[in-house]
Amino acid sequence: MSKPIKVILFDAANTLIYKPSLYSNMLTVLQKFSYDIDEEKLQYHHKLLSEIINFPDRTSREFYKEFNAELLLSLGIIPTEELLNELFSACSYLEWKAFDDVMILDKIETRKAVLSNFNSTLNGLLDQLIGENIFSDIIISENEAYRKPHREFYELALNKLNVSPEEILYIGDSLKLDIIPAKELGFKTLLIDRLNIFSNYKERISNMNDIVNYL
């Protein structure tokens, strides 16, 4: 018999919080250089590239230049130094915002926690954007010896949360970083796929409100 869910464990970036001006800023730069790219296409390519290239806890100009160069190539655009510098200037240090649908979390009585590849600012961000005392634990890779997709990071979460794997529902936006390693340890999992990119994957939701139906 399946054990009841005692903890809902969330990824953070692009699961709970995001940068709302990222794509519009990128499109503005591309239009300046006479490239007319559809926003949905840009989002699709950006998301798929994010499945391949692992973001560090603290990003840098060099990282974004390399990432954006690959993104431009995937769109059929040859990256130039001028274009890469403009993209970095337009897309760096953007404000984080909570997705509107995370407000449902305050109404879900099940214990909630976070496991994220992020830097140590995440605690303050989540308190500010979602609310204090929403999450019992916020486990951040920069503060630990491990990060996703390493199995040890998930095992660390199990020890901190003091529950068995099958008592956790893990929700994240990446198959590679979130869903696969969590499933390997026996977590229940849901992929949050707001952009409907991974339509072949069945255990997914498009909105945080769908958690209520799952529970």
Image (cartoon, grey):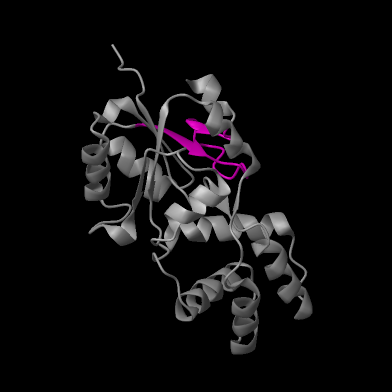
Q: Nearer the viewer, residue 206 or 5?
A: 5
Magenta span includes 195: yes
| Farthest residue, direction bottom | 81
Residue positioned 30% across, 56% down in the render: 147
Does the image show residue 34? Answer: no
Q: Position of residue 29 (x, y in %)?
A: 72, 75
Q: Nearer the viewer, residue 84 or 88?
A: 88
Q: Position of residue 4 (x, y in %)?
A: 34, 18
| Farthest residue, direction top | 1
Q: Position of residue 99 (x, y in %)?
A: 61, 45
Q: Is residue 102 above or below residue 21?
A: above
Residue positioned 38% across, 61% down in the render: 120
Q: Nearer the viewer, residue 128 or 198?
A: 128
Does the image show residue 20? Answer: yes
Magenta span includes 27: no
Q: Is residue 60 left or right of residue 24?
A: left
Residue positioned 38% across, 56% down in the render: 117
Q: Is residue 92 left or right of residue 109?
A: right
Magenta stretch secondary structure, dominant: loop
| Farthest residue, direction front | 132
Name the image quarter holding residue 27.
bottom right
Q: Which residues are magenta?
A: 188-208
In the rendered image, the quadrant that contains the N terminus is top left
Q: Is residue 68 above or below residue 6?
A: below
Name the image quarter holding residue 8.
top left
Q: Position of residue 160 (x, y in %)?
A: 24, 40
Residue positioned 66% across, 75% down in the render: 90
